[in-house]
Image: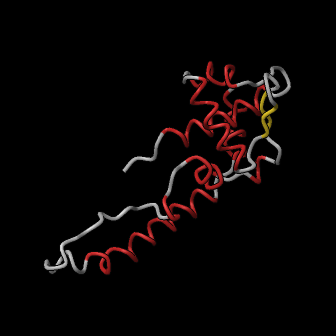
Amino acid sequence: MQISSRFTLAVHILACIEVFKDDYKVTSDFLAGSTNVNPVIVRKILGQLKAAGLVEVARGSGGASVPKPLNKISFLDIYNAVECIENGELFHFHENPNAACPVGKNIHMVLDDKLMRVQKAMEDELSSITMEDVMQKTRELI
């Protein structure tokens, strides 16, 4: 299983907005230059972040900004904004296990609780990391 690059792109975008907010108008074209991703993809991610309240985007070439303190934006907030998770479930079960098979008819009972524990552990860890953590390390390196 691999989380899509939308998550890391979203973190990259938020970091760029913060780093360059005082010196540049941070537009999708500007962000595309840093992420090396097509501006259309950047705009889609910005739209998802905006819908989640994690960025504000001025119309036209007004640029993007972060409307809340970075220590209030967790990786889980970002993940939930940009990753498509059906019904809040990280793991998607194959649709029709064979009910005539002893494994197939019991696989949900065997795995459901374990998969929920894995998802909860991941969500707890994502909740513990904030954009402020990212920016502290970024500032050390630039």
Residue 64 in the image, given as x and y percentages of width and height: 77, 32
Q: How many tags in the picture? A: 0
Residue 106 horizontal side relative to residue 45, left or right = left
x 51%, y 65%: residue: 87
Indicate whether 26 appears above or below 112.
above
* Residue situated in front as seen by the camera: 56 or 135: 56
Identity of the residue furthest to the left in this view? 101
* Residue situated in front as seen by the camera: 3 or 81: 81
Residue 86 horizontal side relative to residue 111, left or right = right
Quadrant of the image containing the C terminus: top right
x 69%, y 37%: residue: 14
Indicate whether 124 appears above or below 4.
below
Indicate whether 138 appears above or below 48.
above
Residue 56 in the image, given as x and y percentages of width and height: 79, 39
Q: Quadrant of residue 59?
A: top right
Residue 75 horizontal side relative to residue 109, left or right = right
Q: Quadrant of residue 99?
A: bottom left
* Residue situated in front as seen by the camera: 142 or 25: 25
Residue 5 in the image, given as x and y percentages of width and height: 49, 38
x 72%, y 40%: residue: 136
Residue 124 in the image, given as x and y percentages of width and height: 58, 64
Indicate whether 91 appears above or below 142.
below
x 40%, y 47%: residue: 2
**Structure colour scheme:** secondary structure
* Residue situated in front as seen by the camera: 107 or 43: 43
